[in-house]
Image (tube, helix red, strand yellow):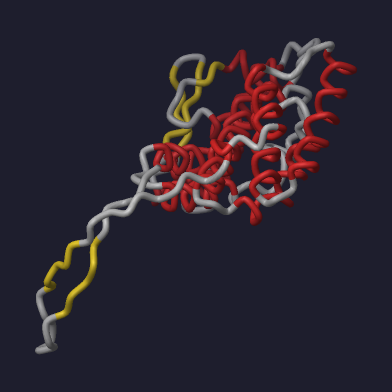
Amino acid sequence: MAVLALRINQLVPVDWLVDLTWPESPPQTARHSIHVRVSRLRAVLANAGAGRDEVEIITHGATYVLRADPMYVDAHRFRALVRAARVAPNDDEKGLLLRRALDMWHGPPLADVATPLTDQLCRGLEEARLAALEEWLDAELRLGRHCDVIDELTEFAMQYPHRQRLLAQLMLALYRAGRAPDALDAYRIARSRLIEELGLDPGNQLQQLEQAILCADPALELPQQRTTPQRTVRRRPSDGAADEFRVIRPDLRP
C-alpha cells in the first residue's frame, strides 16, 4: 500500500513489488502472493468505504495503479505545499507554507514498513524535505528572524554535517545575532570534520563567508529597507459605517 500510495495514479509493475518484498531469492509463488495481498488491500479499502471517495486499485496487465486524489496522501500534500511556497509572492507567505509542509513530518518516511529498500523508495522524499527546510531557513533569515532559528539550525547542522548550506545559514544567523566567534567556531569544527571524514575542504561559498565574517563585511547585515512613498486608498463603507481609509505600501525589497 505504501508503494502504491507513493506512486499514486502511476503504473506499478508486479515484478517491482516482488523485488521490494523479497530483495533476495523470491519464492516461486511471489507473483501469486502479490496478487493475494492486493486483493486483501482492495477488501480493506472497500470495507473502509473508500469507494465513495473514488479510491481503488486497478489492474493493468502486469501492473497495478492506485487511483485516488493525490491529496489523500501526505507525501503528495507535502510536495504540493512546497510547490506553492516556491511561487509565493513574499517571504512571509513562503515561510508559512514551508513551515506547514515541514510540520507534516513526524519521523522517517515509511518508518513502520519492514523492507531493506525503504531508503531507496524514500531517498527523493527525504532530499525534498531537506531542501524545503533550507528554503524555509533562507526565508526566515531574509525576514530578520536569525535569533529565532539559531537553536533549530544548530541541531540541523549537527544532524546533517555534510550539508554546507545549513552550515552557512547557521554561521550567518550567529553573526547577525552578534555571535561572530561562535560562527567562526562552527566553521572550523565543520571544516575539520569534512577533512577528516571526506578529505574535502569546505566549498568556495563557505570559505568566502568565513572571510566576510572575519572582515565584518557590511554585506552580511540585513539590507536596509528603502523608504517607499505611501498612498491612501478609500474603501467602500459597509453597513452604513463611515468611510474607512488604509495605507498601502508595496512590499519592501532589498
User: Which residue sits at x=60%, y=25%?
Assistant: 124
Q: Is residue 2 visible?
A: no
Q: How many marks?
A: 0
User: Which residue sits at x=60%, y=40%?
Assistant: 133
Q: Nearer the viewer, residue 42 or 234?
A: 234
Q: Is residue 4 visible?
A: yes
Q: Quadrant of the rendered structure where residue 169 is?
A: top right
Q: Indicate the position of residue 146 as horizontal and vertical percent values.
A: 62, 50
User: Which residue sits at x=72%, y=16%?
Assistant: 29
**Residue 107 appears left or right of 36:** right
Looking at the picture, does residue 73 appear above or below residue 190? below
Indicate the quadrant containing the C terminus: top left, top right, bottom left or bottom right.
top left
Q: Nearer the viewer, residue 57 or 148?
A: 148
User: Which residue sits at x=85%, y=16%?
Assistant: 195
**Residue 135 appears left or right of 169:** left
Q: Nearer the viewer, residue 14 or 123?
A: 123
Residue furthest front in the image: 215
Indicate the quadrant containing the N terminus: top left, top right, bottom left or bottom right.
top right
Q: Indicate the position of residue 207 as horizontal and vertical percent values.
A: 70, 22
Q: Nearer the viewer, residue 60 or 252?
A: 252
**Residue 185 appears left or right of 111:** right
Q: Indicate the position of residue 101 as horizontal and vertical percent values.
A: 53, 47
